[in-house]
Image: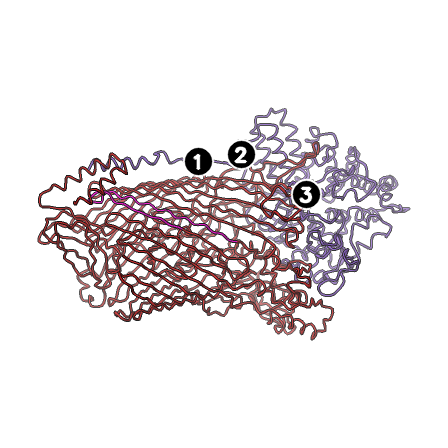
Amino acid sequence: MKIKITAAILLSMLFTVSCTDLNEELYDRVEDGNFGNTPKEIDALVGGAYSSLRGFADGISNNYPTCEYVFFLNEVVSDEATIPTRGTNWYDGGQYQDAQKHTWKADNRMILSAWRYNYTGIAKINAIIYQIDKSSLTTQAKTPIYAELKAIRAYYYYNLLDMFGNVPIVTNFEDVDLPSNSTRKQVYDFVEKELLDAIPYLNSSVVYSKLTKNVAYSILARLYLNSEAFIGTPRWQDCIDMCQKVSGYTLTPDFFANFATENQTSSEIIFAIPYDSKAGTVGNYMSSMSCHYLHKLTLSPTGNYPWSANGMCAQPGVYSAFADTDKRKKCMVAGDQINLATGSVIIMDNGEPLTYTENLTSLTDAKENEGVRLGKYEMKAGENWERDHDFVLIRYAEILMMQAECYVRLGAPELARPFLQQITARAGEEMPTTIDLAFIDQELLKEFTFEGRRRTDNIRFGTFFDPWWEKGETEAYRAIFPIPTSVLTTNKNLKQNPGYPLN
Amino acid sequence: MNSKNKKLVLHQMWTTKSAVLMIFMLFLSAGIFAQGKKQITGTVYDNTGNVLPGASIVEVGTKNGTTTDFDGKFSLQVAVGSAIEVSFIGATTQKVQITGTSSNLDVRLQNDGYALAEVQVVSVGYGKVKKSDLTGAISTVAGDDLVKGTISSTEQVLQGKVAGLNIIRPSGDPAAGATLRLRGGTSLTASNSPLIVVDGIAGVDINVVQPSDIKSVDVLKDASATAIYGSRGANGVIIITTKSGTKGVSVVYNGLSSIGYVTDNLDLLSANQWRGYMRETGNLDAVDYGGNTNWQKAIEQTAISQSHTLSINSGKADSGFRTSIGYLNNEGVIKKSGLERISGNVSAYQYLGDNKDVKFDMGLFANIDKWHPIDYRIFERAYNLNPTIPVYDANGNFTSVGGNIYENPVEILTNRTVDNKRHRLLGYFKTEVKFLNDFMVSANISLEHNAVKGSTYKPSYAVMEGRTEDGYAQKKYEEYTNAQGEIFVNYNKTLDKHVIGALAGYSYFENIYEGFGAQRSGFVTDAFGYNNLGAGYNYRLGDVYSYKGKSNLVSFFARANYSYDGKYLLTATVRRDGSSRFGENNKWGTFPSASAAWKISSEEFMDGTKGWLDNLKLRVGYGVTGNQDGIGEYKSLSILGVGNDSYYDPVTKTWSLAYSPKQNPNPDLKWESTEQVNIGIDFSLFNRITGSFEWYSKKTKDLLYTYEVPQPPYLVGNMLANVGEMSNKGVELTLNANIIKGDKFSWDANLTLGHNVQKIEKLSNPTYKTDVIYSGSLHGLAGMSGQYSQVIAEGYPVGTFWGYQSAGLGDDGKMLYYNAAGDKVLEGALVDADKRDLGNVQPDLTLGIGMNFKYGNFDLGISGYGMFGQKALNATNMMLNDPNRLPAFNVPDDFLNSGITSSPKYSSYWIEDASFFRLQTLSVGYTLPLKYKSKVRVYLMGENLFVLTNYKGVDPEIGLNAQDGINQTGVMDLTGLAAPGIDRYNNYPRPTTISVGLNFTLNN
């Protein structure tokens, strides 16, 4: 009998007795706290703050990489672009129509996307600061890294200030208490202070795509330009002063050099989000969203160009606002579209020719071919769905235009002339005899068409609240967007922006 | 012991070279010299050849006796020349004379009524119990009763066989798996599948076992039964016992050849209908491509399939082995699709010692699958394409008309090469040692390995994703290995009328998964296919990848049984599970259960019912079980990883990879826990009808879900957490009847019915607030980006359609809707508050039915299943009935007369009752008896001969998982939301199949 017990014990010894260890072993990722100790690792962490500028494929708001949606939103609520419903396509719950008619509700997915884009960027930077805090770097080495990270964070908060106004300010990664709103003024002050504090430690040289002193000056200039719209206090002179600190840039002789596939060589771009499909970047879908799906035949006889979604186009009136001599007019694709293989106009499946018209039947029922298309960025045969051109956020032309506008607003329009002259000369346009705000507004439209900043200009000029195309008058509270419904649901400490229904 | 046996023992001694065993044998040999007495061993079988546990063996005229163990085996020392009496309730007692030469006895008892069904041995996890002694809700299906036919996915064998178990196959694709749902599922995540246990090895892929190797399947349904599997038991446990060497020698061949074809396609316009419509409507500009194509038929084929299995079985008194080999070539009814499988199985056992105190048992299962996954986007193309477009142009090339979602589906199927291969392997070794009379220690070690190799090539001339890439090649490999070790001790003791059982054990389970892949595009020549990735000149980040992860699960478990006089039965179990996946604050969970049963029919006061009520048993059970499938590895940790977060370095003009935080850490992450009460009644009537009735109530807490969390402060907007509560309540009925039991003619019938009501009880807790989760994504359908069709909300079941109530079409063909006030309004007048509950995808009733007739040598079998009361969104129909489609896109015939003038919008108009009954199999066979109980059976079988339904789509049986639909259309469902009941261009047709089969059983 003992022998059988022995056998049983022997059997049980097949198993190691100490098999109760439940720690997770990691193979293809690292746990936080085990990273950020070498210069290379620090670079890889800080790099994450820049890569987040591209946005991300977002399952919650269920859309394309979100920076596109920040862009879409600011364009579609402005007087510049539209996403009309075309038959069945582009209805999508009416979110684009609502945006266009300024009847958006708090559950509009574009608004949620814009919120999530900025706060994901902020949270990522907070997490990176936390990692670097824990790293073995000296305090001295950490200071410039923090300055750069906080300046990028201030860029995101600037977006939130502009779009949502009264947003919570969160700076500590470890604090997961549900925050409450700050006032728009507090957010404004925060953005200003964070940038001013960072500037002494930022890189003074011209460094493409990095948050340098020049970029910080430019964001501050934008802040002061819109100060009246944001908090009711005009700061036109502060804007001019800040613009004058920007140095090292010139306008490119060719306007479209800023939008070429290899636009990183432009001497005009102050801040941009780099893209390279070979480096796995995802997003940058402006070209993909606008043209008709047969447009590829105009670029390649074999159709070697990615599908496009036949969505966004210019609002009626935008194309004709450009003089035919204006070199910038080519930022739009209009008229008959020629099949390179046949030399004749492309025929759509319904038998009609593919001719992009300026007018649209209506926002709610546009035909396939209606609307002039966005062609600002280079389109060429052989491109991939993921584009290679960098997405321009700030270029030197804006520094010139800001100064011009401020001088006009300060009652010294002639001081604006030298700045405007550079802009119009490149476009091949004549300067008017008198420079007024209406001229500035039109020039902003033509210079920055589809660059994602028209909403802010409309609000600053007050045109945002006037009726246009299929939109009626807009109430003042819509100068900022509502805080998204799902954010309010999950955080009961937040209050909805004034004017919007609570639910 | 005669010399022959002695030699065998010696032989084994030396081959095992185990000193321990040798000494052990010497002890046993001492018994040989006992005067006048001899040790006999034997096995008791019922009339169908199944072993009988608990049969009593008594030396006639003495009190010397014993009972058979769970394998029907006994050993007893008796006087030479005496006799033993073998008896069992419900069976005729048999007397066996003991002579000087008898040592190994086989006793076959004759059936005497219902009772033999009750002695079936049921696997309950880490042990077996007689059916009559069960206290939990367990359904058993014998191997012979499993679904037959051309089966490429082992789950299918249980379709309609177990009350409360739904098996949903999303399509007729032979390479598609099936989804199992027991009692409604307990989780919001996709992980609602029961735990699969094969020959005692838990957590394996059910497809490692082929249907022909299955001896029986036990489905553990209630928590009192499944709690022994702790944190993996909440969705039920399916225990598969495979065939092993039985007494005698037999060779069995099963062969099947079949033809499968499509009976139901959507009725879309033919080219002539299209032309007629264009003429009538004066639409003369519409482009007519001059062809005449039925695009659905163009991608279909007649499927020719075959299946062969061959097994050899040999069993002796103390050993047995069985081997089998199988080949399946199951063609699909869509061109290129199908599954080819080679499978093999070897199992052997050996007892040692005259008392059979030591048993070694091993099994090896292996199979290799080959298939060519098809791109499910072809179905949408087949519905879209204008019927005037010919498949081939005048030059014999594929016609390619530009346009979105308009690629030639035949071209996609033909030009793309996808070769996948999967290996599955399961091996185990088990040892059992009996000691101190009443104890048995068991030790199991097992290894399961599953690997998939995939190779894809899209040539530079392929329209979809080939041309723009200039050729695209991909190779990938993924594998996982589960290693498991278990040791447990069973104690069984009978003291007069008291029967005591106890179990205690330990288990260690480890899963390691890893994989790698590479892809390239830009090929100068298409000659290499996927065989020379280096020849592609285009390299992108993410083109090469690898990954690896690991998790482990450590468990301690125990069970105690007590019964008095076979009338009062009690069982209690407890398991303590620790998992590496759980968060730091919740590493260990405890899962207890208790159950009791009362055999009312054994009471004296029931004597009056003996004439008709053979058995009546009441069972009550309560238990807590867990579900941890919803937690992936490393989900509780704060992780830095590399994604496609590359960043540009303007100084070096190069790109580098960023390391970013990836998820919100959740140190509280833990299993979902389900409390379940089950009350069951087992009965047997008139010696003909057996059945059981179950009532259950389940409450699941700490529902795992990727909940939305506020941003800020969280890093990302969602987080895997334990928040909500869900309930499932239902009843089940199982009936088996031997309606006619004649020697010449017999008629059996079985019926399973299940009814379940599910409700989400809660979605918020103090930390996480959720009003409603939108699910059933319609993203990717034209005009429906970011739109949802369903809600997960308190008070409703999962899969509740939520939207506007249609009021039909107005006179102008515009869709009208009811607003909240009950008025008919146009779309523009609707507000959110007008949305309402439009029904849900949960069936009210599930049904399985089967009948077998035998007349002489002829047999007839029929089986079917159905689901009733569930709703489905016919999104295919919704998108096809679009006035914007013509002339470019095809439409259903019905559309022309429908008068619809508004663009598709989701509403109750497109939600249909998807109730159905499917005739699963109908077979007719003839058996030719041969010498030595050998036989040949030939049969003819039809599968899926008809479906009774009012559903208008291709098939009312729609997948349960969002992945079934959305992934197949090429758009990732990033939310991971389960979207059951949405028919979305994903109707791989289920074929109707006619087969001819041959079974050969040779016995010696």
Q: Earlier in the sequence, mark 2 or mark 1?
A: 1
Up the image or down, B953 lies above or below A462; here it is below
Do labels 2 and 1 touch, CB within 8 Å? no
Write down the quadrant of residue B309 in the picture.
bottom left
Q: Which mark is residue A159?
A: 3
Question: Could you tell me which quadrant the C terminus of chain A lies in?
Answer: bottom right
**What residue is pinned by disc 2?**
A32
- The amino acid type of the residue labelled 1 equals Asn
- What are the residue bounds of the magenta stretch? B344-371
Q: Position of residue B801 (x, y in %)?
A: 52, 61
Do discs 2 and 3 belong to a common subunit? yes
- What predominant SS class does the magenta segment belong to? strand
> How many neighbours does mark 3 have within 10 angstroms: few (below 14), some (14-19), or many (20 or more)?
some
Give the chain ID for the red colour: B
Question: Could you tell me which quadrant the N terminus of chain A lies in?
Answer: top left
Give the chain ID for the purple colour: A
Label 2: which secondary element? loop
Say which chain tag 2 marks.
A
